[in-house]
Amino acid sequence: MPKYQSFQSILDNQVMVPKQLLTDYTKLGLEETELVLILQIHRYRTEGNSFPTPEELASTLTVSSQECSKILRSLIQKQLLSIEQQHNEQQVLNECYSLEPLWEKLFTYTPVNSPETPEFNENIFPLFEQEFGRPLSPFEIETINIWLDEDGQSPALIKAALREAVLMSKLNFKYIDRILREWKKKGIQTVQQAREHGKQFRQGQNSRKEQPDTRKKRDISLYYNWLEEDL
């Protein structure tokens, strides 16, 4: 009898996983390591830990915490995992992982790499990592996803804003976000419109140069050079 109770306690301590996740995960572009990591995030959530660290996740896997961080970034890039903010019982704002994007795609399945869904949004994430010289954090990836999904910014304009930040030596997400908001405020929706905006900017600068001014002027010759390129 005690032996039966011991086994029963094991059976009672289970985590429910949708059968469709196990049968269709490859259709979502998931690899086995990514699937196991998702299952661990799901398990931690049922245990009350909605934001496990890469170190905590790695303790139950055969990969390192660095590899876990890489997989987390990949899942966010694929828009199968997101980071949300919610208040706990003490009304303190905390971050948490959400698998809602995964469940939504799982139960409203659309094939990966279809013409309507370019892979990784035209490689915009690797471009950011190349310019920053490091892997993006989950929060930075989520910021890019917000620009794409919630703000409706096109990948081309986001790339243009990134290049502008590089040329101005202000390579940070707040500055890029400010550029995108300013362009949206002015109704700039395409790279061509951004190019015309740059021409108007330069014309304004040239008209000021014609006025006598003994102050030392800042070289702005590179300010909008990227707009003359084909992105």
Image: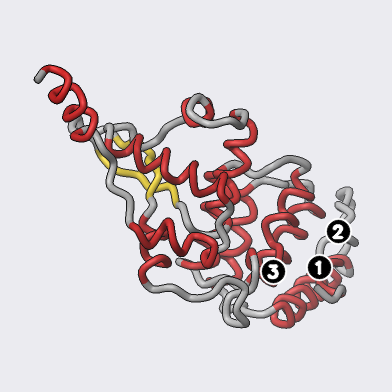
Amino acid at dot 3: Glu
Q: For the residue marked with disc 1, what is the amino acid?
A: Gln
Of badges 1 and 2, the one in the foreground is: 2
- Spot occupied by residue 60 in the image (x, y as percentages of width and height): 48, 28
Upstream in the sequence, badge 2 or badge 3? Answer: 3
Quarter the C terminus occupies = bottom right
User: Which mark's residue is nearer the viewer, 1 or 3?
Assistant: 3
**In the displayed structure, would residue 228 be above or below residue 70?**
below
Which residue is painted at 38% across and 39% down in the image? 95
Q: Are marks 1 and 2 in contact (CB under 8 Å)?
A: yes
Q: Which residue appears at 76% of the width and 71% of the height?
A: 201
Picture quarter with the N terminus: top left
Q: Name the residue under label 3.
A: 122
Per the image, label 3 sits on a secondary structure element best described as helix
Numbered tag placed on residue 220 in the rendering? 2
* Residue 77 can be seen in this image: yes
Determine the residue positioned at 62% across, 49% down.
173
- Depth check: give the residue in front, 203 or 134: 134
Residue under the image location 18 percent in, 22 percent down: 6
Look at label 2 and name its amino acid. Answer: Ile
Residue 136 percent across, percent down from the top left: 64, 44
For numbered disc 1, what is the local secondary structure? helix
Q: Do the residues bearing badges 2 and 3 touch, measured as CB atoms within 8 Å? A: no
Which is more N-terminal, label 2 or label 1?
Answer: 1
Q: Mark 1 points at which residue?
A: 205
What residue occupies the far left of the structure in this picture? 1
Q: Which mark is first along the chain, 3 or 1?
A: 3
Q: Is residue 124 above or below residue 115?
A: above
